[in-house]
Image (tube, rainbow, N blue to C red):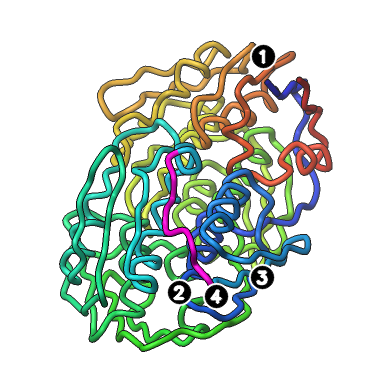
Amino acid sequence: MQKLIIQGGMPIYGEVRISGAKNAALPILCASLLTADMLTIENVPYLNDVITMLNLLGQMGVGIETEKERMTLTAAHLNHLIAPYEMVKTMRAAILVLGPMLARAGAAKVSLPGGCAIGLRPVDQHIKGLQAMGAEIEIEHGYIHAKARRLSGAHIVMDIVTVTGTENLMMAATLADGTTIIENAAREPEISDLANCLIAMGAKIHGVGSDIITIEGVETLHGATYRVMPDRIETGTFLIAAAASGGEIYLKETRPDTLDAVLDKLMEAGAAIESGPDWIRLKMKHAPKSVNLRTAPYPAFPTDMQAQFMVLNSVATGTAIITETIFENRFMHVQELKRMNADIKVEGNAAIVCGVAALDGAAVMATDLRASASLVLAGLIARGETVIDRIYHLDRGYEFIEQKLSMLGARIRRAT
C-alpha cells in the first residue's frame, strides 16, 4: 500500500496550474449516455474516480478514446445496462448513470453506491424524482431496478439540497416528454458546468445556477465538444497550503468566481489576495488569525474545504469554531490532527480549534478524500517527518498532488 512521506517546515512558493474539476468531469462523462453521437470532453483530470467511471461506461458499451486530458465518448450501442457493485462500491458518483441510462435506453440496473465514509448520503431524492417522471423503480438485493418507456416532465420539489440528485434528474429530464421543473435544486458550479455541456448537446435548460431549474425535454441530443471547469476544491487546497505555511502562490487556469466564501475566509485569516478572471495570487505576510466557519450548500462555505481550513486554524492565533452542517461524520481527520499536536475538541457537529505554535510530524492515516488533503497540509507545516497511510483516498480527487507540491518547494515523496 502506498503512502506519502513529508518533511515539513518549508513555505509554499511558486506557480501551479489547476486541473479540471473531478465533481464536474464525472457527471459530464455520464452525459455521454444521452446521445449516440460523439461527445468530446476536454480538461478531464487523471484521477482514480475518473478511471473508475470510464471503466464503468466502457463495460456498458460506450466507446472511449483518450488523449491526455481530452476524451471522446460514443454511446451509439449500449449493450449492458448494468452498473455492478464491484465497479461502483468505491465511488458514489456512479449513481449518475441512472438518470441518463433510464432516459435514453428505458431501463437501468444500478448498484447502490459507495464512496467516502463521511456520513449517510441516501439516494431517495433521485428515486423520488424519477418516479415523479413516470419511472417504475424497485430496490432488490442492493440494486436499483428502473424502467420506463419514456419519461414524462414533472414538477419536482427536492426535500433536501442534493448535488448528485439535481444532476441525475436534470440529465434524465433532457430526454423526457414535456417540461420538468426542479425546485430546491443544488446551485454548485459543477451543476452549472454539466448544464452548459447539456445545452451544448442540444438540451433546453433554463435557470442554470439558481435553485429552480426548468428543462424542456427534446427528442434527441447530439454530440458536442466541451471543456470541464477548473477544480475549485483543488484551488482552495493549494491556497491554504500557501497560507498555512506562510508562503506565496500564483494559481493559473482557475475560477475565482466559484470560491467567494473560501477567499473571504482566507482574507479574514490575514491572507493578501489578488485575482483576475482565471488566476489567483495569495501572499501570507503574518501568522494566520483564527476564523470561525460554518459549512452549507453553495454559495456558502463548502464542506469539501472544511478539513483543510481546520489545519489553518490549528496553527492560527486564537480559537475558532468550525460547524459542519452537511455530513454527520466529517470530523474523522480530527483524531489524526491531534496526533500531530493540534488542539481540537469536538462537540456534536462543531469542532473547537485552539491554535498552537506548531504541529509535529507523525504517522497518520487518511480516512476520506478531503481528510487526506488536510493531512498533507498538516505535514507540510509540521516539524519533522509525517507519514500518511492509505493515500488511495487522495488519488481519487487530486491530480499529481505530490508533483505539484514539489514544484512549489515541498519536500514530499510517495513510497510503497
Name the chief secondary structure element in magenta. Answer: loop
Q: Is label 1 in contact with label 4 (beta carbons under 8 Å)?
A: no
User: In what element is the residue under mark 1?
Assistant: loop
Which residue lies at the image location 46% right of the left edge and 87% below the top edge? 202
Answer with mark 2 or mark 1, whichever residue precedes in sequence: 2
For disc 4, the marked residue is 76
Q: Amino acid at mark 2?
A: Leu
Q: Which mark is residue 361?
A: 1
Q: Position of residue 49 (x, y in %)?
A: 57, 46
Between 376 and 133, the one lying in front of the other is: 133
Between 167 and 264, the one lying in front of the other is: 167
Answer with mark 1 or mark 4, whichever residue precedes in sequence: 4
Nearer the observer: mark 3 or 1; the answer is: 3
Q: Which residues are magenta?
A: 77-85
Q: CA distance from mark 1 to mark 4?
A: 53 Å
Which residue lies at the image location 20% right of the left edge and 71% below the top edge? 133
As for residue 84 lying within the magenta part, the answer is yes
Q: Amino acid at mark 3?
A: Thr
Nearer the observer: mark 2 or 1; the answer is: 2
Q: Is label 3 in contact with label 1 (beta carbons under 8 Å)?
A: no
Q: Which mark is residue 34?
A: 2
Q: CA distance from mark 2 to mark 3?
A: 14 Å
Direction from residue 46 to residue 59 in the image, left or right: left
Q: Compared to 243, does 188 lie above or below?
A: below
As for residue 250 lying within the magenta part, the answer is no
Q: Position of residue 407 (x, y in %)?
A: 83, 42
For disc 3, the marked residue is 72
Nearer the observer: mark 2 or 4; the answer is: 4
The total number of labels drawn is: 4
Q: Position of residue 397 (x, y in %)?
A: 59, 44
Q: CA distance from mark 4 to mark 3?
A: 12 Å
